[in-house]
Image: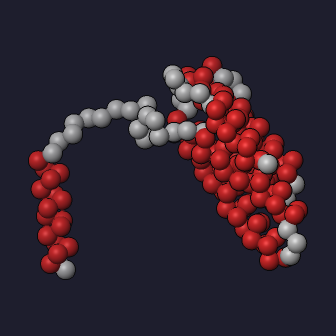
Amino acid sequence: MKSKIQMTKISNFFYKIIDAGDVWAHCDLFCGVYDPAQARIEAQSVYNAMKIYHMAKDDASKQRVVLIKEQRAELVKHHLWVLWTDYFQPEHAEKFENLHDLFWKATKAAGDAKKSVDPADGQKLIDMIDEIGSIFAATKDGYQYGPVASNMLGQAK
């Protein structure tokens, strides 16, 4: 208990002597943290798992593939929500009128992919994320989404 009290005192001391002042950011995190590539990588994993499911010879392998696919689809939803709610701003929604609808549909597609083993559902999810990636690139100076999508094509084989 004594060490916990000491740590609290040390923390309080540092908070008193270090004043960062007011901080403003347009994003919840630092610029450079947000990237649709995270969602794309997970969506590619979902798609690949769907293909592997149909090649699996035994039920244990199929169960394992479904578990991994569902975990990856949930990660897609997470990455999409972070981009949608933390990165994109009202001015982006004004410029790209389909932005909210696209995110809603992509998030729904990730949920649908959790319930499916049809690679067409995985491809639909990838296509929506690629569209989001293109919009993201149009809002971020110097960012290119094309190489992300191109690199992932090799994963589909």
Q: Position of residue 16 (x, y in %)?
A: 13, 50
Q: Position of residue 37 (x, y in %)?
A: 61, 41
Task: Report whether residue 122 is seen.
Answer: yes
Q: Quadrant of residue 52?
A: bottom right
Q: Viewed as shown, does residue 57 lie left or right of 12?
A: right
Q: Residue at x 43, y 41 (%)?
A: 29
Vertical relation: 155 (above or below) 138: below
Q: How many marks?
A: 0
Q: Position of residue 19 (x, y in %)?
A: 17, 42
Q: Position of residue 97 (x, y in %)?
A: 69, 23
Q: Viewed as shown, does residue 16 lie left or right of 120?
A: left
Q: Nearer the viewer, residue 147 or 107?
A: 147
Q: Nearer the viewer, residue 4 or 42?
A: 42
Q: Residue at x 87, y 63 (%)?
A: 55
Q: Viewed as shown, does residue 124 lie left or right of 14?
A: right
Q: Quadrant of residue 26?
A: top left
Q: Quadrant of residue 90?
A: top right
Q: Residue furthest bottom?
A: 1
Q: Residue at x 19, y 80 (%)?
A: 1
Q: Nearer the viewer, residue 148 or 13?
A: 148
Q: Residue at x 26, y 35 (%)?
A: 22
Q: Nearer the viewer, residue 148 or 115?
A: 148
